[in-house]
Image: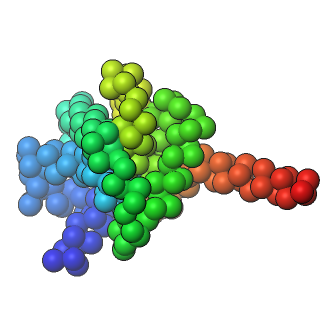
Amino acid sequence: MIPGILEFLRALTNPERLIELLSTLLSGWLGYSALSGVVFAETGLLLGFFLPGDSLLFTVGVVAGAGELNIVLINAALMVAALVGDSTGFFLGRHTGPRIFSRADSVFFKQEYVTRTKHFYERYGGKTIIFARFVPVIRTFAPFMAGVSQMPYRRFLSFSVFGSTGWVLVLTMLGYELGSIPFVRRHFDAAVLLIIFLSLVPTFNEAWKHFRSKKGTGALS
């Protein structure tokens, strides 16, 4: 079962394999539903942080550019999935937050993920919901932390709408426009890695600032 799941996840970030999947096992509405389910699970379920997010959206854009998906329909479906995932994570945090903070580390869950998101959230407040959409792992836990902090849902939703629609639109359209370029198709793995790297830049920046602040504090003490 696990090898099958891993094979499915690998297919989500490879245009040729995703096209094959969409034309066989996941044809028609089933393909749209499966892709939406992955996007939902990444933020709606705390264990979804390992799922491909940025790379999936970029690949979906490439596949849509090849005519295998309707770019308007898939964008609408993924935006709704991202919004519903955010809201699910939010209410999960509101109702179960304290228990999560006392949970022990496991293979799929690390307290470090929650702590890192908490610091990110405290630094940027509500804007975290928008910023986090472009940062792997952080985007999984940011809606949860908003729920834990008892942010008013209407305020949370306004940030979630901007973050979710912007994230989906930017990355799918990048794939849609760039996927037809022969150089990008020949070096697709490198293009995906570049997308992932760019999405991690905010995290690297925060880590560097944290390191500099600790170093400065240590020099003064």
Which quadrant would the C terminus be assigned to in this image?
bottom right
Write the residue at 35% across / 47% down.
97
Which residue is situated farthest in the right direction here? Answer: 220
Which quadrant would the N terminus be assigned to in this image?
bottom left
Q: Is residue 152 above or below residue 109?
A: above
Write the residue at 37% across / 63% down.
103
Which of the 4 image quadrants contains residue 104? bottom left
Q: Is 159 on the left or on the right of 12, as rendered?
A: right
User: Is residue 63 something one can see in this rendering?
Assistant: no
Q: Is 12 on the left or on the right of 183, as rendered?
A: left
Residue 159 in the image: state x and y as whole percent.
Answer: 41, 26
Residue 54 in the image: state x and y as whole percent.
Answer: 41, 49
Q: Nearer the viewer, residue 36 or 151?
A: 151
Residue 177 in the image: state x and y as whole percent.
Answer: 41, 39
Tally the marks: 0
Q: Nearer the viewer, residue 70 or 1?
A: 1
Write the residue at 36% across / 55% down.
100
Q: How is the image coloured?
A: rainbow
Q: Is residue 52 above or below residue 105?
A: above
Residue 60 in the image: state x and y as whole percent.
Answer: 30, 47
Write the residue at 37% across / 24% down.
152
User: Is residue 47 something one can see in this rendering?
Assistant: yes
Q: Nearer the viewer, residue 35 or 141?
A: 141
Q: Is 76 on the left or on the right of 177, as rendered?
A: left
Which of the 4 image quadrants contains residue 71? top left
Which of the 4 image quadrants contains residue 24? bottom left
